[in-house]
Image: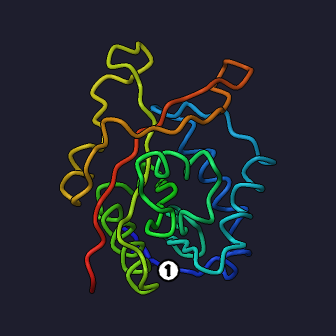
Amino acid sequence: MSQIEIQALAGPDVARHLDAVAALRIAVFRDWPYLYEGDLDYEATYLAAYAASPESVFVLAFDGARVVGASTGIPLAHETAAFIEPFVARGIPAADVFYFGESVLLPEFRGRGLGHRFFDERERHARRLGRFRMTAFCAVERDAGDPRCPPGHRGNDAFWSKRGYRRQDDMFCHLDWPEVGAGEASSHALRFWLRPLESA
C-alpha cells in the first residue's frame, strides 16, 4: 500500500495542480450520487474562483506526484449567490461562515482515513483565519428509490454526523449540471450541513 502525502495549499499556490483537480472532480462526480457529465470549461472557471481567493484552501492527496484526492474551502462571502442566499435567509451573516467545497478521492484510495484528514485540514485552516463562527457544506439530495442508485451504496450522513455536522431540514441551494447520458443541464437540490467552529 502506497504512502499518501497530504498538502494544504493556499489558493494562489495551487495553480499548477488545477488541471489535475479538475480531472479528478470530473472522474469522481461522474458516479452516484452526482452523475455529473463533466465539462472542462466549467471546471476551469469554478476552480479559478477558489484559486483567486487568498483565504481559500486546497487540501490535496498525492500518491507520488499524482493528485488522487482533493478537498477545498473558501470564505462563504467569496462564493456565489447560490451558496450565500440560504444563509442570508436564515439570518446567518456570510462573514461568519467558512464554506467547504468538494471532497473527492479516487475509489482505490478510500478507507484510509483521508476523508477525516480533509475535514481536519480545512477546519484547521478556518480556525487559523480567526473570524469564523461555523463551517458548512452542502451535498446533493437524491430520491431514496432512484433506480440509478448502485446496490449496497452507503451515503456519508453517518460520517458527517460523527464529525459534528448537523443536517439542515430547511436549507438548500439549487445548482444546474448535465447528468451522464442526459444531455441538457437540469436543476439539483443540495442540502446544507453546519457545524459551530470551536476555537483552537
Closest to the observer, 17 or 75:
75
Would you say 187 lies left or right of 87 here? right
* Colour mapping: rainbow
Q: Position of residue 7 (x, y in %)?
A: 49, 80
Closest to the observer, 19 or 89:
89
Position of the C terminus, as image quadrant, is bottom left
As shown in the figure, which amino acid type bears the numbered disc 1?
A: Gln
Closest to the observer, 151 or 130:
130
Under circle 1, the secondary element is strand
Would you say 52 lies left or right of 115 here? right
Q: Residue at x 60, y 75 (%)?
A: 65
Location of mark 1 (residue)? 7
Q: Residue at x 47, y 45 (%)?
A: 89
Q: Residue furthest right?
A: 41
- Quarter residue 179 falls in: top right
Q: Position of residue 85 (x, y in %)?
A: 55, 47
> Does 65 sit above or below residue 101?
below
